[in-house]
Amino acid sequence: MKPLLSTNEGGDRGYKVAYVVHKFHSTSNPSVETDSKMEYEEDGPADLMGMVTLRSLGPESLALPEHLTLPASAASSTLTIEIAYSFLPDAWGKGYATESSKAVLEASKTARAYWTPFSKLYVRSIVNGRNPASIRVMEKTAMVKRGIYVWTGKPIFIGGEWRGQDDLHIFGMYLME
């Protein structure tokens, strides 16, 4: 089993973070209105909503033109990570992606020791142009839109169809400088 966090495969240190999002069931009857807050039983039943991941870029990562990413001169002192998420359809449109992505980004800012030996941390996100909801999520997390990259390549199955070309919206920002 591969480690869940940092790895040292092939001599290069890779960084991986997974944040699983659950919806806990309330311990009170939600149909009864009260002035008190709902209480949630965190050890009780919960529904999986989705997950947010961060990973450092590796050789398999999509290479982007310099105007859409960091300048080559900054690459040696800056760790670039990519944020991605996946949620089940029941969780779509309810703010889970925005809230959990913000939480992961905020936690990443404060976990400076984890990102050692890098003093600078840059996060990027690649969003398919046919997914306007995810574009809005990135905007709400304060990610800066760097531009659009027109990807062309061997057809892949995404969004219910085979595609050999797509408009990819590139977002990025420094978490640590």
Image (tube, rainbow, N blue to C red):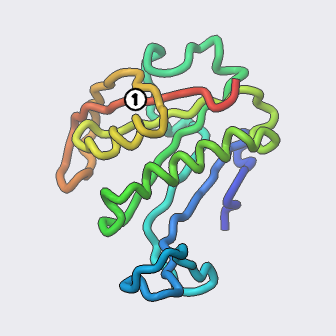
Q: Quarter-wise, where is residue 70 in the image?
A: top right
147 with respect to 36 (left or right): left
| 24 and 57: which is toward the camera | 24
Depth check: give the residue in front, 56 or 83: 83
Work out which residue is located at the far left of the displayed protein and give it. 161
- At which x and y percent is residue 152? 26, 31
Q: Position of residue 73 (x, y in %)?
A: 64, 11
Q: Is residue 161 left or right of residue 116?
A: left
Is 177 drawn above or below residue 43 in the view shown?
above
Badge 1: residue crowd in 10 Å (few <14, some 14–19, many ≥20):
many
Can the viewer see residue 11 in this picture?
no
Would you name the residue on which mark 1 appears? 170
Q: Position of residue 132 (x, y in %)?
A: 26, 41
Q: Quadrant of the C terminus?
A: top right
Q: Determine whether 57 is above or below 120 in the image.
A: below
Q: Quadrant of the N terminus?
A: bottom right
- The reply to whether residue 113 is in sight is yes
- Residue 49 lies, with reference to residue 126, above or below; the image says below
The residue under the point 63% across, 32% down is: 175
Residue at image point 56% right, 13% down: 71
Looking at the image, is 66 positioned above or below residue 19? Answer: above
Q: Residue at x 58, y 50 (%)?
A: 103
Residue 12 falls left or right of residue 137: right
Give the residue at the far front of this rendering. Answer: 35
Q: At 58% from the left edge and 86% from the top edge, which residue is drawn?
A: 44
Of 17 and 105, nearer the camera is 105
Q: Position of residue 142 (x, y in %)?
A: 48, 33
Q: Amino acid at mark 1?
A: Ile
Q: Secondary structure at mark 1?
A: strand
Q: 94 or 21: nearer the eye?
A: 94
Q: Say which quarter of the image contains residue 57.
A: top right
